[in-house]
Amino acid sequence: MTTPADIIAHYRAKLAFETDPSDVYAAQKAGESFVLVDTRSAEAWAQGRAKGAIHLPTREIADRAAAEIPAGTPVVVYCWSPGCNGGDKAAAVLRQNFARALGTSPTAYRARFTCRPDEPIRLPDRELALA
């Protein structure tokens, strides 16, 4: 049987490795030092990305991370959504460099935070232009 203490321990452990767009934005505004990594494809990157992010597609992280992310620097990774495991895969590859995973997308930033689009994000039922 799961106890309340088990539940609390589970979520505390989970939060040690995860963050959300609001916390990332607050950390950026506070000047905290970390690297924000967009792990999506080049096509997704071109549609829009979180301000300050670098582009390291998951399949390229093993080859590029050491050259592009200073050792010991906290890293926040993101992909399209909580249902996308690209950020988790990136975290597994980064290992010692990894600090927190962000399971969301630049679309989560569009209403409150600055995104950098090359073109509007196209969703199946509508088109959202990022300002």
Image (cartoon, rainbow, N blue to C red):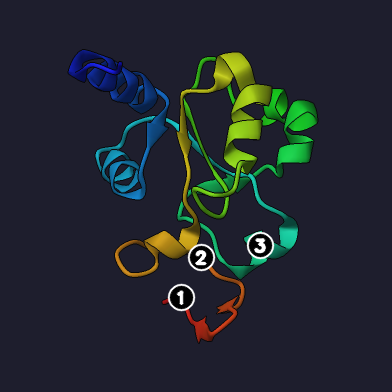
Q: Residue at x 34, y 27 (%)?
A: 15
Circle 3: element type:
helix
Pick whichever, 43 or 11, lies toward us: 11
Q: Quadrant of residue 16?
A: top left
Q: Residue at x 51, y 65 (%)?
A: 116
Question: Is 3 left or right of 80, judged from the image as shown?
Answer: left
**Residue contact at pointers 3 and 2, CB within 8 angstroms:** no
Q: Quadrant of residue 64?
A: top right
The residue identified by callout 2 is 116
Mark-to-mark CA distance, 1 and 3: 14 Å
**Residue contact at pointers 2 and 1, CB within 8 angstroms:** yes
Label 1 CA crowd tier, 10 Å (few <14, some 14–19, many 20+): many
Q: Position of residue 41 (x, y in %)?
A: 72, 55
Mark 3 or mark 2, earlier in chain: 3
Pick whichever, 29 or 82, lies toward us: 82
The residue identified by callout 1 is 130
The residue identified by callout 3 is 44
Q: Amino acid at mark 1?
A: Leu
Q: Residue at x 35, y 42 (%)?
A: 24
Circle 2: element type:
loop
Q: Position of residue 102 (x, y in %)?
A: 46, 41
Circle 1: element type:
loop
Question: Is 118 left or right of 17, judged from the image as shown?
Answer: right
